[in-house]
Amino acid sequence: MNALENSLNKIAEHILHFDEASLTSLWDKYKGKVEQFSHSAEWEKAVIILSIINAVRTKNAIINEILLKNNTANKTKSSLEKPKEKPYLKLVK
């Protein structure tokens, strides 16, 4: 792994420890900064920060979607595997 990849991996490790709720609370702030274009290092940093926030939100949304599908599939599978018991009913004439 080269130095660039090492740096990116370290950054990713740090980002993975950030709480999505805390990042989301900053989303409006950085969205506003990005919308107010200025050819400056601060604007460029704001774009990167907003992208990081969106990346974490996207990652979590994908994970939640996959977990939901797996849980639904497991519930469906387990309900299919269990033999259905006949309900206790009496015929009344």
Image (cartoon, rainbow, N blue to C red):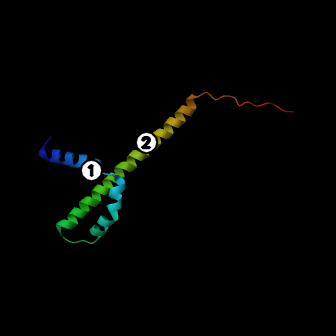
Circle 1 SS class = helix
Amino acid identity at mark 2:
Leu
> Circle 2 sits on which residue?
67
Q: Residues within 10 Å of mark 1 (few under 14, many from 20)?
A: some
- Relative to residue 3, is residue 44 drawn left or right? right
The reply to whether discs 1 and 2 touch (Cβ–Cβ < 8 Å) is no
User: Residue 12's spot in the image, x, y percent?
Assistant: 24, 48
User: Residue 14's spot in the image, x, y percent?
Assistant: 24, 48
User: Is tag 1's residue or tag 2's residue first in the polypeptide sequence?
Assistant: 1
Residue 64 position (above or below residue 22): above
Mark 1 to mark 2: distance in Å?
21 Å
Is 67 in front, or is 24? 24
Amino acid identity at mark 1:
Ile
Q: Which residue is drawn at 32% across and 62% down?
A: 26
User: Residue 60's spot in the image, x, y percent?
Assistant: 37, 49
As drawn, the residue found furthest toward the right would be 93
Q: Residue at x 56, y 29 (%)?
A: 81
**Which quadrant does the N terminus fall into?**
top left
Q: Residue at x 27, y 72 (%)?
A: 36
User: Residue 6's spot in the image, x, y percent?
Assistant: 16, 44
Q: Residue at x 14, y 47 (%)?
A: 4
> Circle 1 sits on which residue?
15
